[in-house]
Amino acid sequence: MIEQDQTTEFQPIFAADTRGMMTLDLTRYLANLRRLHFSEKLIQSEKDSYNTCINNLRTIPFTRRDSVLADVVEYENRDCAFFDSYRWTKTMDVYNGIQLLQTLTDGDSAKVKVMIYEAYPDSQGVKKRVWETPFTVQLVRTNETWQIDDIR
Protein backbone atom coordinates (compact mmCIF):
# COMPACT_ATOMS: atom_id res chain seq x y z
CA MET A 1 0.00 0.00 0.00
CA ILE A 2 2.79 2.44 0.77
CA GLU A 3 4.39 1.73 -2.60
CA GLN A 4 1.07 2.74 -4.21
CA ASP A 5 1.07 6.02 -2.24
CA GLN A 6 -1.81 4.87 -0.03
CA THR A 7 -0.32 6.04 3.24
CA THR A 8 -3.24 7.26 5.35
CA GLU A 9 -3.00 4.25 7.67
CA PHE A 10 0.78 4.45 7.96
CA GLN A 11 1.28 8.12 8.84
CA PRO A 12 -0.73 11.16 9.95
CA ILE A 13 -2.51 13.21 7.31
CA PHE A 14 -2.60 16.98 6.98
CA ALA A 15 -6.05 18.34 7.78
CA ALA A 16 -7.95 21.48 8.78
CA ASP A 17 -8.92 21.98 12.40
CA THR A 18 -12.25 23.51 13.46
CA ARG A 19 -10.85 27.01 12.80
CA GLY A 20 -9.65 26.10 9.30
CA MET A 21 -6.00 26.04 10.34
CA MET A 22 -3.59 23.23 9.51
CA THR A 23 -3.13 20.33 11.87
CA LEU A 24 -2.42 16.63 11.69
CA ASP A 25 -5.13 13.99 11.82
CA LEU A 26 -3.66 10.94 13.52
CA THR A 27 -6.93 8.98 13.77
CA ARG A 28 -6.38 6.30 11.11
CA TYR A 29 -2.66 6.08 11.81
CA LEU A 30 -3.12 5.42 15.54
CA ALA A 31 -5.97 2.99 14.84
CA ASN A 32 -3.63 1.09 12.54
CA LEU A 33 -0.93 0.95 15.23
CA ARG A 34 -3.51 -0.50 17.63
CA ARG A 35 -4.61 -3.02 14.99
CA LEU A 36 -0.96 -4.06 14.62
CA HIS A 37 -0.66 -4.53 18.42
CA PHE A 38 1.51 -1.55 19.30
CA SER A 39 1.42 -0.83 23.05
CA GLU A 40 -0.40 2.24 24.36
CA LYS A 41 2.96 3.46 25.72
CA LEU A 42 4.51 3.37 22.25
CA ILE A 43 1.38 4.89 20.68
CA GLN A 44 1.52 7.79 23.15
CA SER A 45 5.21 8.29 22.42
CA GLU A 46 4.46 8.25 18.70
CA LYS A 47 1.64 10.75 19.18
CA ASP A 48 3.93 13.04 21.20
CA SER A 49 6.59 12.93 18.47
CA TYR A 50 4.27 14.95 16.19
CA ASN A 51 3.62 17.79 18.69
CA THR A 52 6.29 20.11 17.27
CA CYS A 53 4.89 19.70 13.78
CA ILE A 54 1.31 20.30 14.98
CA ASN A 55 2.37 23.43 16.88
CA ASN A 56 4.23 24.73 13.83
CA LEU A 57 1.19 24.22 11.58
CA ARG A 58 -1.35 26.07 13.76
CA THR A 59 -0.73 29.46 12.12
CA ILE A 60 -1.17 28.25 8.52
CA PRO A 61 -4.67 28.35 7.00
CA PHE A 62 -5.36 24.93 5.48
CA THR A 63 -6.51 26.58 2.24
CA ARG A 64 -3.01 28.08 1.86
CA ARG A 65 -1.13 24.82 2.47
CA ASP A 66 0.16 24.41 -1.09
CA SER A 67 1.41 28.00 -1.36
CA VAL A 68 2.99 28.19 2.11
CA LEU A 69 4.41 24.67 2.08
CA ALA A 70 5.39 24.43 -1.57
CA ASP A 71 8.54 22.35 -1.07
CA VAL A 72 9.77 19.58 1.21
CA VAL A 73 12.24 22.07 2.76
CA GLU A 74 9.33 24.08 4.19
CA TYR A 75 7.96 20.89 5.78
CA GLU A 76 11.43 20.04 7.13
CA ASN A 77 11.76 23.53 8.64
CA ARG A 78 8.53 22.89 10.58
CA ASP A 79 9.54 19.34 11.63
CA CYS A 80 6.74 17.99 9.42
CA ALA A 81 8.59 16.08 6.68
CA PHE A 82 7.57 12.68 8.07
CA PHE A 83 6.09 11.74 4.67
CA ASP A 84 9.54 11.84 3.06
CA SER A 85 10.83 8.63 4.66
CA TYR A 86 9.64 5.48 6.36
CA ARG A 87 9.12 6.08 10.07
CA TRP A 88 10.76 3.03 11.63
CA THR A 89 13.67 2.58 9.21
CA LYS A 90 14.29 6.34 8.87
CA THR A 91 15.07 5.91 5.18
CA MET A 92 13.37 6.34 1.82
CA ASP A 93 14.24 2.77 0.85
CA VAL A 94 11.42 0.26 0.59
CA TYR A 95 11.90 -3.03 2.41
CA ASN A 96 9.54 -5.97 2.04
CA GLY A 97 10.99 -8.71 4.20
CA ILE A 98 12.17 -9.45 7.72
CA GLN A 99 14.60 -12.13 8.84
CA LEU A 100 14.32 -13.18 12.47
CA LEU A 101 17.79 -13.32 14.04
CA GLN A 102 17.16 -13.85 17.76
CA THR A 103 14.35 -13.97 20.31
CA LEU A 104 14.92 -13.54 24.04
CA THR A 105 11.95 -13.89 26.40
CA ASP A 106 11.74 -13.03 30.07
CA GLY A 107 8.28 -13.57 31.52
CA ASP A 108 5.96 -10.96 30.02
CA SER A 109 8.63 -9.23 27.95
CA ALA A 110 10.66 -10.22 24.93
CA LYS A 111 13.33 -8.77 22.66
CA VAL A 112 13.37 -9.80 19.04
CA LYS A 113 16.32 -8.97 16.82
CA VAL A 114 15.43 -8.73 13.12
CA MET A 115 17.14 -7.80 9.89
CA ILE A 116 15.05 -6.09 7.24
CA TYR A 117 15.65 -6.59 3.54
CA GLU A 118 14.26 -5.97 0.10
CA ALA A 119 13.73 -9.06 -2.03
CA TYR A 120 13.64 -8.37 -5.75
CA PRO A 121 13.80 -10.51 -8.88
CA ASP A 122 16.66 -10.28 -11.33
CA SER A 123 17.93 -12.46 -14.17
CA GLN A 124 19.53 -14.88 -11.68
CA GLY A 125 16.39 -15.37 -9.54
CA VAL A 126 15.53 -13.50 -6.36
CA LYS A 127 18.14 -11.32 -4.68
CA LYS A 128 18.06 -9.60 -1.31
CA ARG A 129 19.32 -6.16 -0.38
CA VAL A 130 19.84 -6.23 3.39
CA TRP A 131 19.72 -3.26 5.80
CA GLU A 132 23.09 -2.44 7.43
CA THR A 133 22.18 -3.11 11.06
CA PRO A 134 19.56 -5.21 12.81
CA PHE A 135 16.57 -3.73 14.61
CA THR A 136 15.52 -4.75 18.11
CA VAL A 137 11.80 -4.95 18.71
CA GLN A 138 10.80 -4.87 22.38
CA LEU A 139 7.56 -6.73 23.13
CA VAL A 140 5.38 -6.78 26.23
CA ARG A 141 2.60 -9.25 26.97
CA THR A 142 -0.65 -7.69 28.18
CA ASN A 143 -3.75 -9.84 28.74
CA GLU A 144 -2.18 -12.73 26.81
CA THR A 145 -1.49 -10.51 23.77
CA TRP A 146 2.03 -9.57 22.72
CA GLN A 147 2.37 -5.88 21.88
CA ILE A 148 5.20 -3.91 20.27
CA ASP A 149 6.59 -1.64 22.97
CA ASP A 150 9.66 -0.20 21.23
CA ILE A 151 11.59 -0.44 17.96
CA ARG A 152 15.28 0.47 17.85
Image (cartoon, rainbow, N blue to C red):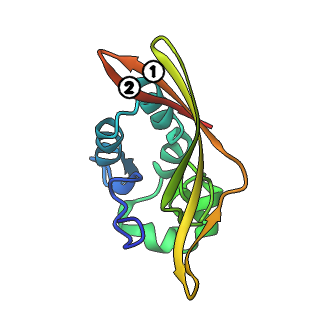
4 displayed left or right of 75: left
In the image, residue 105 sits, relative to residue 11, either above or below, namely above
In the image, residue 67 sits, relative to residue 143, either above or below, namely below
Q: Residue type at mark 1: give it.
A: Val
Looking at the rendered structure, which numbered label has been put on residue 146? Answer: 2
Q: Which is more toward the observer, 60 or 124?
A: 124
Q: Which is more toward the observer, 99 or 49?
A: 99
Looking at the rendered structure, which numbered label has been put on residue 7? Answer: none
Q: For the C terminus, which image quadrant?
A: top right
Query: SS for tag 2?
Result: strand
At a point 33% along the width and 53% down the height, the residue shown is 9
Q: Position of residue 75 (x, y in %)?
A: 57, 61
Q: Position of residue 23 (x, y in %)?
A: 40, 50
Query: SS for tag 1?
Result: strand
Instruction: Name the residue beneath numbered marker 1.
Output: 140
Q: Which is more toward the observer, 139 or 18?
A: 139
Q: Residue type at mark 2: give it.
A: Trp
Furthest residue to the front? 124
At a point 62% along the width and 42% down the height, the residue shown is 135
In the image, residue 124 sits, relative to residue 34, either above or below, namely below
In the image, residue 98 sits, relative to residue 145, either above or below, namely below
Q: For the N terminus, which image quadrant?
A: bottom left
Q: Position of residue 11 (x, y in %)?
A: 41, 53
At a point 35% along the width and 67% down the height, the residue shown is 63
- Could you say which quadrant of the image residue 73 lies in? bottom right
Q: Position of residue 148 (x, y in %)?
A: 45, 31
At a point 50% along the width and 58% down the height, the residue shown is 97
* Circles 2 and 1: CB atoms closer than 8 Å: yes
- Could you say which quadrant of the image residue 85 lies in? bottom right
92 displayed left or right of 148: right
